[in-house]
Image (cartoon, rainbow, N blue to C red):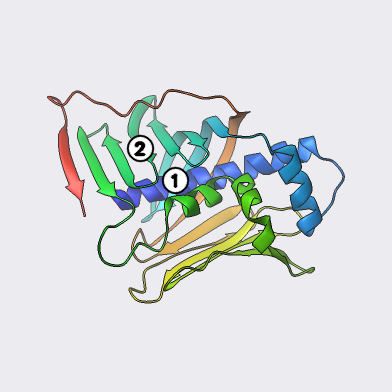
Amino acid sequence: MNRGLLLLLLLIAMALTQCKVTREAQRQSASGLEGMDGLREQCVSLDSVQTLLIKKAEAILMFDNERYEVTVTLYSKRDSIIYLSAVNSGFEIIRASVDKDSIKVIDRLNHIVYRTALKRKFGYQFPVSFNDLQNLIGRFYLCDDLEIAEDDLIDVVKFEFDENYIKKRIHIDRKNLKLNMFEFRHQKTDQYLMGERSGDKLKVYSNFMISEFEMQAKGGTVLYNQEIAVKMKVNPRKYTFTELR
């Protein structure tokens, strides 16, 4: 278990969220508008959303020629925290949280708590930040950045968030407004995180997180503006604490 696995699971949850939020937003807006017009309309319908909770979504993960079945719960509070729980056969195997500065993972199987900084004090930053993960987890977070969006009027709506030495871009399919692709690449360290959709699957590539995986998801209940208590404390006598760099 390491930071990479946490980000892996976050991306699983992100793919779940993109599908579900799209369906929920379509229920709220049935005009069929595409591109920037459709995105603005969905942003208006979701303007009051501050939290997102997805409960009991089922996911099948294919990684390293292995198949894993998990039930995922994802909670996201705007500009505050991302929380994730993954359950296999009724037993929670991982609980994790991400805030602006740090990542914390509770490995229930091995009774280990992993902690690491997401934002580095020294040296080059990672190619992704908390805001990047938030934008991937729920498309409505991108509504805050509509002024930088570019509609190519053919295939996609583009968002570019380039920083010093880091190229960051997210593309939304202009017809169905689903996540189409994303790319985060650090020009100095050559670390990258990229993803692209093929049909109903999302493939992710990375050289600092994990190599590649595929995920299929279904079900789950989506609730907006329902806050939950995020519990990340454990009995220190039963767990080993590890700081990752």
Check disc 2 and give the amino acid type: Ala
Q: Residue 89: which quarter of the image? A: top left
- Whole-Å distance between the Cαs marked 1 and 2? 9 Å
Question: What residue is at 31 percent from the left and 67 percent from the top?
Answer: 124
Q: Which mark is residue 88?
A: none
Residue at the limit of the structure toward the bottom, as seen here: 188
The image shows residue 180 at horizontal and vertical percentages of 63, 60
Q: Is residue 69 above or below residue 189?
A: above
Left or right for 170, reference 234: right
Q: Is residue 148 above or below residue 236?
A: below
For this rendering, which residue is in front, 176 or 190?
190
For this rendering, which residue is in front, 108 or 138?
138
For this rendering, which residue is in front, 67 or 54?
54
Left or right for 174, reference 182: right
Q: Residue 99: which quarter of the image? A: top left
Question: What residue is at 84 percent from the left and 52 percent from the top?
Answer: 33
For this rendering, which residue is in front, 133 or 146?
146
SS type, badge 1: helix
Q: Which residue is mark 2?
A: 96
Can residue 1 be seen from the camera position used here? no
The image shows residue 122 at horizontal and vertical percentages of 25, 62
Left or right for 188, reference 38: left
The image shows residue 39 at horizontal and vertical percentages of 74, 51
Q: Which residue is mark 1?
A: 10
Question: What residue is at 71 percent from the left and 53 percent from the top?
Answer: 177
SS type, badge 2: strand
Check disc 1 and give the amino acid type: Leu
Disc nearer the start of the sequence (1/2): 1
Residue at the limit of the structure toward the right, as seen here: 31
Q: Quadrant of the C terminus?
A: bottom left
The image shows residue 37 at horizontal and vertical percentages of 81, 54
